[in-house]
Image (spheres, rainbow, N blue to C red):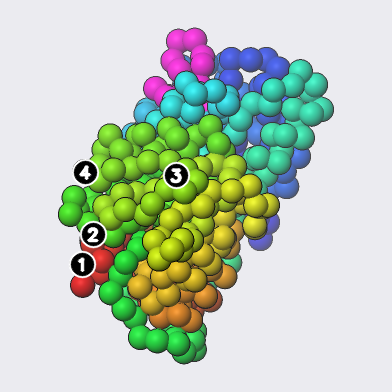
Amino acid sequence: MPKRLLRVLVVDDSVLYRKVLSEVLSNIPGVEVVGTATDGKVALAKIPQLKPDMLTLDFDMPELDGLKVLEHVRIDHPDIKVIMVSTHTKEGAAITLRALELGALTFATKPRTENPLESKTVLFDQLAPVVKEIISQIQPSQYSAGKDLAVSQPDVIDAPQEKIIPQTAAGRIQIVAIGISTGGPKALAEIIPCLPQDLRVPVVIVQHMPSEFTAALAESLDQKSALKVIEAENNMELKRGTIFIAPGGRQMKVVNISGKPMLEVNDDPPENHCQPSVDYLFRSVSKVYGKHALGVIMTGMGSDGVLGLRLMKRLGAQVIAQDKQSCVVFGMPGEAINAGVVDRVVPLNYIAIEIARRAGE
């Protein structure tokens, strides 16, 4: 039986970008570009006819802009995946973040070049990994064990464990470390406001995003949360009840300076092609906090975080993972579950409850 192609509708008011995006997507195996649309109204009219699985959606368009189109799609066609096409500006970052919170899968940034060949290369590098992940979701899943685990029980469940013998029993939680990627802004917008105002531990987060976007993410979450949410800076003290988001394009780790836990933000190279990297953060958390840490691995592509969680588990840390059903992409938590380094698998709407419970014990 032949594999089903991913049907894509390209929506952009620029003739150039309709052509460039169509060519880029057509060069990804398993993709069929079924049409283009010059604006939002045309796109919404074409969806019932073309039945796309995915849209690439520009922000600035006449008649109906990208955000309004996204709102309609999420209501009327919730199964369609949407990738926004953004620009690297402060204003663009805020709008892009709003789109991600509304349910866009991720975004691609229009290259700052007039060279069509360079534009195609840059866009291909951004789109190909995400599109391949979407294709894998309409084909049989590679995470068979994780899939069975998630489907068999939609509520909180214990995960099968690798035979890791901790050096010490789990202790009182003193820090929560979260690793998250694709689908992260929407997921964080759901769980962060649900964390209690009296949370007595700091929270450190790596969200895979470029440098222009993490400050906007911190600002947006801060407005929604009873806790203080900030983009981390070098030499910040880890204060209880504060949430620190790693800045895009840099690495963040926890260090112990004269007995005081601090944050170090630096320009160390990417790990797992990521900067910031979840593994980089988790490894430092294991070193400083040992059995007193709680690791949380959430929606995202790839396997960033698994090696760090393995170290955390060996030192007695607790680990929870988001379940498959509530993930936009099950890559990162799926890899951690299959590696046997997760104590408990929970749906998105249980994660804040689970964090508060474990941090309060």
Front position among marks 4 and 3: 3
Q: Are marks 1 and 4 in contact (CB under 8 Å)?
A: no
Q: Earlier in the sequence, mark 2 or mark 3?
A: 2
Location of the C terminus by quadrant is bottom left
Q: CA distance from mark 1 to mark 3?
A: 24 Å
334 shown above or below 39: below
Span of residues in magenta: 57-69
Q: Position of residue 218 (x, y in %)?
A: 39, 38
Amino acid of disc 3? Ala
Amino acid on which the number 2 mark rests in the picture: Arg
Say whether disc 1 or disc 4 marks the residue closer to the N-terminus: 4
Relative to 326, 6 lies left or right? right
> Based on the displayed image, in which of its 4 quarters is residue 120 positioned?
top right
Measure the C-alpha gap from mark 4 to mark 3: 18 Å
At 38% across and 77% down in the image, what residue appears?
291
What's the residue at 79%, 23% (across, down)?
Answer: 116
Q: Specify whether residue 20 is painted magenta.
A: no
Which residue was labeled with disc 1? Answer: 360
At label 1, the amino acid type is: Gly
Which residue carries the number 3 mark? Answer: 232
On residue 200, the disc is 2
